[in-house]
Image (cartoon, grey):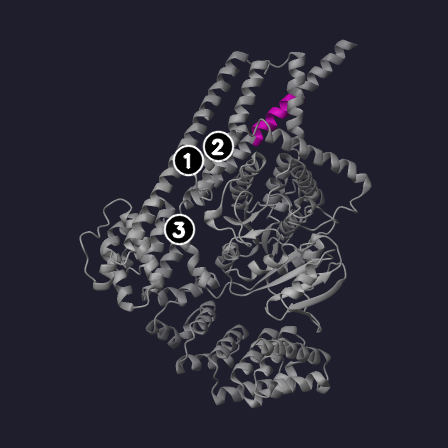
Amino acid sequence: MSGIWLDITGTLFEIVSIIIMIYVVAVSIAYVVLFFVAARKLNREKDLNESQYDQVLEEELAPPLSIIVPAYNEELNIVWSVRSLLGINYKQFEIVVVNDGSKDQTVQYLIDEFDMVEVKSRVRWSGLGKPTKPIRGIYRSLQHNNLVLVDKENGGKADALNVGINVCQYPYFASLDGDTVLDQDAFIKVMKPIMDAGPNEEIVATGGSVGIANGSYVDSGYLSRESVRLSSKPLVVMQVIEYLRAFLMGRIGLSRHNLLLIVSGAFGIFKKSWVIEVGGYEVDTVGEDMELIVRLHRRIQEKKSKAQIVYVPDPVCWTEAPEKAKILRRQRTRWHRGLYESLWRHKVMLFNPKYGKIGMISMPYFLFVELLGPVVELAGVVTVIVGIFLDTVDVRITMVLALLMLLYGSLLSMGAVLFEEWCFKRYNRVADLTRLFLFALSETFWYRPIMTLWRFEGLIQIVRRKNQGWGDMARGGVMNSKKPDNRTNGGQP
Amino acid sequence: MNSMDPDSVLTVVLWLCAVMLIALVALYVYLAIRKSSFNRREAAVYKLRKELEQSDSVLEEYLLTGETSRRLSTKEPFRMEAIQEALLHRLSISRTPEERSRIYDFAEKYFSSQYEHSLHDRQWSTRMNTLLWIEQFQMNSMEKDLLEWMNDPQCSEEEYFQILRILSKLNSHRVPEYLRENNHDLSDSQLLQILLPLNDELQGELIAEFEQYPFRVRCSFIDSLRIRNIRSAEVLNLLERQLVGEDSELRIRSLKAISNFGYLTPEATRQLVEQMENEHDHTVEQVSWPERLMRARVMGNIREDIFVPYLEEMLGDSAYRVRQQAAESLAAYKNGLELLEKVAAGEHADRYAREMAEETLERKQYERNLA
């Protein structure tokens, strides 16, 4: 009897090991492919002169843009946030601040600072069909013709954005986190693909790279080139590397073939008509930014349109990364839940040839590599331990394979650093480079296992919360740059 | 794994590890060297540039007198970069045409051979950067090379457009020729970038043969006339001709340009009033709201008393932005604020009109208080 069981366990064990092996090889190859796609593009563009933007900056034909700024308990930053936005390099834009039922003085501060008065006449509505939380009032600034404040009842960031979409009047809108620090030319850089699109091309959304501002000096809403420093905190340095990898390898590789499923929640530009067509932001999800992109892709495919979602590798904005493990953990488990929700809602697209490359490549990639990655990784560790225990795995080979994975991971991270150096040169000291290198080497030992655990925890939360319902997910703070743990905003980097 | 010999597996994996380790270290060394040499170069160029920008430098002397000194050589390391940057900076602040032409002459004399060379570099970004320099220094002598490269199958889309933009800055006759072709794939913004720099002669050519250009070029050309603020009889004539045309997009852009122009001939005024009268009487269909918006703007900038009743009617327009513009335009008339006060006080049947009048008065009041 026990012999049969041992046999079955042995076979099972072998099957699992083989699956894991195949998985590891497949994922490694996927990363290498992404690496080379990005390398080709960025090598071509390395050391390109910044002055390519000068011409466009002077130009009048940049399409008018509405900037939507959702705010929840933002009394500390909202005034300088709006001030720095009013000073951006852009020809024609309006700023729509949407107060999401703040409990502090956000509304009053804005009204006082910018001489805002209530709008009495009927406001032109964009016609987003989705119901939103009631609006308490709409104010306009007497100082600045292009500044509008919408005061509404609390409904979460997605709801606030939907209201902003309804109130704003221009054909393109930018969604912005309250604590995002923008490059002064951010809008022009991210709009450039839209402005360069020929008569037969259509661009539905664009997004740029997000940098980590920790350690740098941000002066009243601006981060100048000279002030960029690499933080001294290990957790932050690891996130810098992680962001570089995610943006410069992952997104460039995916964007090149219109496979991108994420535009950063911190800063993205959307064509309003498309967003309205698909129904705006989903309110009861934690990852509303990714969900919207997936839905836009779905619509593009269903309409058999050639429209594109484009990623601009230029570092156009900066955000504050969590410095405490506790907060980072909360962020990552949340991102993972968001990822799951976006995939789950659109599961019909998975392996569905009707959805073209998105269904056959992007969705499986995000499902198997991003979402289920932690499961396989943990299973791998468990298998190896069990294997060593049962003496079916050669300890030496295990150790060497582990070493190989470590080197491989570090090589990819360094590859991302190389791309950064080719094109943007944000970190201008050799010492910063050396630190990035050393941390990249150490990643496998501590950062990666921790991330795997937290993402796994996110998966567990999904299973558990399923029974409790999602009702209370979207509430809580919309954003607050001083307390990033309160945010429900922001998808993956 | 069981089927394989553990030792050979081990050897293979170890080799792989060694390769990766070497690659990793090589990558780091490459990056560190690149970074430090980049920083050194930046510092050296910066220092040289500062020297060149001193008031008694050889470069200053050249810009003042036009006489080159042998000390102004571009041969030494970083000299060329430093001079390029110094000249570029100078161009951005320079006001006198003599100085500008001296800068261009200098570039022709000292940079062209280098640029000719790097225009054929294997690296795309080097070629692109070279094109950007050629554009800044408006190097006429490069035209032949540019045209050649443009027709080379290896020329990328970005370079192609960049060359077009340079040709337009050099006022090459190739530009109207190119624009007349119907098959190009440029965006509106790119068309505008090509149309804006054209000189009077080429512009005249476009005005004279306006109808022969593709529709999108015509639209962008009208925008370019507005942005450059060209106020000539030919331009006004062209714009007024579009107003009675069939295409609403051209009408809208022309109205926008006319509102910038600030004048309309009596004949065109009469035609506009007639059109609005016909729409009011419902003998013809009303135009789209963007066109009504532009009409309201024109009537605010040209301010003929005959327009007032139409603006008052537009206060009750179905489109918010038309109402807003109508109120704004009315406020620009001599007795405009009184008119708006009357409307706000209830002399308009439409509630939206009254609200808009009130809102505009509020803002005008605020602006007056600030002043």
Residue A17: image tag? none
**Residue type pointed to by label 3:** Asn
Query: The disc numbered 2 marks a residue on which chain?
Result: A
Disc nearer the start of the sequence (3/2): 3
User: With A79 as the anchor, is B345 left or right in this view?
Assistant: right
Q: Is residue A127 visible?
A: yes
- Percent across and percent down for residue A30 are 55, 34
Query: The disc numbered 1 marks a residue on which chain?
Result: B
Alpha carbons under labels 3 and 2: distance apart: 26 Å
Front one among A77 and B224: A77
Query: Which stretch appears magenta?
Result: A16-27
Q: Give the quarter of the figure containing the N terminus of chain A.
A: top right
Tell me, yes or no, whether the two marked residues, 1 and 2, touch with CB atoms within 8 Å. Answer: yes
- Percent across and percent down for residue B109 are 22, 56
Q: Quadrant of residue B278?
A: bottom right
Q: Is A21 within the magenta?
A: yes
Residue A437: image tag? 2
**Other-residue count near label 3 (Cα within 10 Å), few / some / many at <14 / 14–19 / ≥20:** some
To which residue does mark 3 refer?
Answer: A49
To which residue does mark 1 refer?
Answer: B31
Query: Magenta stretch: dominant SS?
Result: helix
- Percent across and percent down for residue B175 are 35, 65
**Residue type pointed to by label 2:** Phe
**Residue type pointed to by label 1:** Leu
Q: Quadrant of residue A367?
A: top right
Name of the residue lying farthest toward the right: A468
